[in-house]
Image: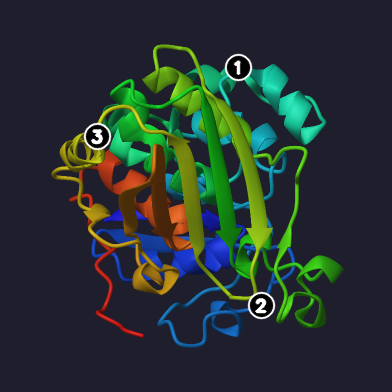
């Protein structure tokens, strides 16, 4: 049994992670931390799970083999070196180790990176592209929800040299993507029966997308216009990506099928996916279509599972030698 801790266990990503790990046959959850719940029993946040213990304020890396960090950006990065020195491997759910260039962190997060010396050894936690690196990494940086969906929607085309120089990504996310802390922008009266675009000057997940597309495209990233939207649903992300069609639609569809052949969680469908199709699962569903000479690729994921904690468990499985699907086989459900 692998001994695991979850830091920041009472946010949405942390709670999802605890539910997934509690049913993983190879994991023993030995510590959950939460500053707001410190000193309270686990049952106060997880009444339906058979977990005994009390929330701690800070994780103890000496107690565990792996530490899942669901802390906000810049909250866990400064402690990561000490956690690694204690022998714990880290699966980080924040943005702290996703970008290879620390200057980009300053640009997008408006503060100096607290541990730039660790960036070189952090594996980008997208198993469809980086499984080999994840297996041997001490530190895995799980990508953001928007970037996960957009990268998976565009990676096959970029890898095959079929991605035009200009790409438009229209993203739509459920409200849980904003986290559990209350705020005016996610207040029920503000978001119900309304859809709005935001971060029009650039979203923080954009540099992750550009970084990965550049690596697939020989170091030359396309120009990406990414506009996210908040929609009045709890969970789910739908990305619609547009770029100039090179060659035939049938050829592009075959490229996607070959690229994702054998991948346990990314499926290429004949019809555009709905977010409900992947809700509460670790699946990513992609459809490749066209309108005239413009390719239209749609991609749906659950932002809290494939877009966060489920992908973290998938990376953990790779790093610790489990079957990649362990703990991620959901019950069938519809609607």
Q: Residue furthest right?
A: 184
Please report contact status of discs 1 and 3: CB closer than 8 Å, yes or no: no
Residue under label 3, please give it.
Answer: 248
Numbered disc in front, either 3 or 2: 3
Could you say which disc has been placed on residue 117 in the image? 1
Front in this rendered view, residue 252 or 178: 252
Q: CA distance from mark 3 to mark 2?
A: 59 Å
Of the image marks 1 and 3, the number of the one nearer the N terminus = 1
Q: Residue at x 48, y 51 (%)?
A: 240
Q: Hey, which quadrant is residue 191 in on the image?
A: bottom right
- With 72 as the anchor, is 82 left or right in this view? left
Q: Residue at x 62, y 18 (%)?
A: 101
Numbered disc in front, either 1 or 3: 3
- With 295 as the anchor, is 59 left or right in this view? right
Q: CA distance from mark 1 to mark 2?
A: 36 Å
Q: Secondary structure at mark 3?
A: loop
Residue 130: % across, % down: 33, 31
Could you say which disc has been placed on residue 40 in the image? 2
């Amino acid at each position: 049994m692998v001994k695991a801790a979850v830091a920041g266990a009472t946010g949405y990503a942390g709670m999802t992670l605890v539910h997934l790990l509690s049913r993983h046959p190879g994991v023993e959850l030995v510590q959950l931390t939460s500053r707001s719940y410190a000193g309270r029993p686990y049952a106060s946040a997880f009444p339906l799970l058979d977990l005994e213990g009390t929330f701690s304020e800070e994780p103890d890396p000496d107690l565990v083999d792996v530490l899942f960090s669901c802390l906000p950006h810049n909250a866990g990065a400064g402690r990561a070196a000490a956690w690694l020195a204690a022998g714990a491997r880290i699966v980080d759910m924040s943005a702290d180790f996703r970008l290879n260039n620390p200057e980009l962190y300053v640009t997008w997060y408006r503060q100096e990176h607290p541990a730039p010396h660790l960036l070189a050894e952090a594996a980008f936690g997208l198993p469809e592209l980086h499984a080999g690196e994840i297996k041997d990494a001490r530190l895995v940086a799980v990508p953001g929800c928007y970037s996960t969906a957009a990268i998976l929607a565009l990676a096959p085309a970029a890898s095959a040299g079929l991605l035009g120089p200009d790409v438009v990504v229209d993203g739509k996310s459920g409200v849980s993507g904003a986290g559990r802390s209350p705020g005016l922008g996610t207040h029920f009266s503000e978001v119900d029966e309304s859809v709005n675009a935001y971060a029009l000057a650039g979203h923080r997940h954009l540099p992750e997308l550009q970084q990965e597309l550049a690596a697939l495209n020989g170091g030359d990233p396309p120009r990406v216009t990414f506009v996210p939207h908040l929609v009045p649903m709890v969970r789910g992300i739908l990305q619609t990506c547009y770029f100039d069609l090179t060659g035939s639609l049938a050829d592009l569809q075959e490229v996607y099928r070959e690229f994702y052949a054998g991948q346990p969680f990314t499926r290429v469908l004949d019809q555009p996916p709905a977010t409900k199709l992947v809700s509460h699962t670790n699946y990513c569903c992609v459809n490749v279509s066209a309108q005239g000479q413009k390719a239209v690729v749609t991609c749906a994921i659950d932002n809290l599972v494939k877009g966060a904690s489920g992908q973290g468990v998938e990376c953990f499985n790779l790093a610790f030698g489990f079957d990649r699907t362990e703990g991620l086989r959901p019950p069938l459900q519809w609607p």
